[in-house]
Image: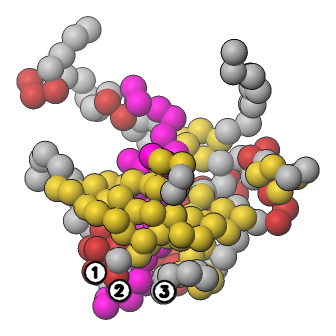
Amino acid sequence: MFYRPEDGHGLPHNPISAVVAPRPIAWISTRAGMGDNLAPYSFFNLVAYDPPQVIFSGDPSDSVTNALESGVFAVNIVEEAALAAMNATSAGFARGVDEFAACGVAKAECTTIPCPRVAGAPATLECRVLSHSRLKGDNNTLVLGEVVGIHLRDDCLVAGRFDVSRFHPMGRLGYRDYVAVRDLITLKRP
């Protein structure tokens, strides 16, 4: 099968998100004039190492709006044990509803930015907005942030390494599918 996205695919569901998978999930937390917000984004990734920088994109939702208004956001890493709570925060809550409270997610304060974070997350990246861009399409905004603080949960540190086998990070596949990272393969570069 071959198709041009502009012509449509003719399938019951769009396959593009299943093709680019697994994608890491950023559980974005923000705070702005309308209050605290928490929502998942699978259009997310680390894009630079020094200084560390991340991107996420989505429609002009509360997370994007709050990040641009406040200039900060936090990326909370989703572990398998938090999958149901993460999914609950993806509901279409009205603007100003605190998803932490609505979904029973424990909240803590970030250290370097005025923003909440998921208290029990294996890791949280505290970020300052560097720039944003409107992408092609009606509702696509890309946010670029510099990581200015990193929280690592103590039980995830083993022999000086951040050990994902301690919490099984979640990834997004296509459609309604997710994957827990369980099998690790270690290779030395040639």
Q: Is residue 105 visible?
A: no
Q: Position of residue 51 (x, y in %)?
A: 51, 57
Give the CA distance from mark 1 to mark 2.
Answer: 7 Å
Q: Which residues are magenta?
A: 19-47
Q: Residue at x 41, y 83 (%)?
A: 31
Residue 127 placement (x, y as % from top left) = 47, 69
**How many other residues sit within 10 Å of disc 1, few (<14), some (14-19) or many (≥20)?**
some
Determine whether the residue tagged by mark 1 lies in a helix, strand or loop.
Answer: helix
Residue at 54% in and 49% down: 49
- Mark 1 lies on residue: 69
- Contact? badges 2 and 3 (CB < 8 Å): no
Q: Which residue is mark 2?
A: 32
> Dot 3, crowdedness within 10 Å: few (<14), some or many (≥20)?
some
Q: Is residue 127 above or below residue 115?
A: above
Amino acid at pointer 2: Ala
Q: Can see residue 77?
A: yes
- The answer to whether mark 1 and mark 2 are in CB contact below 8 A is yes
Residue at x 67% of width, y 39% of height: 181
- Spatial CA distance of label 2 from label 3 is 9 Å
Q: Which residue is mark 3?
A: 114
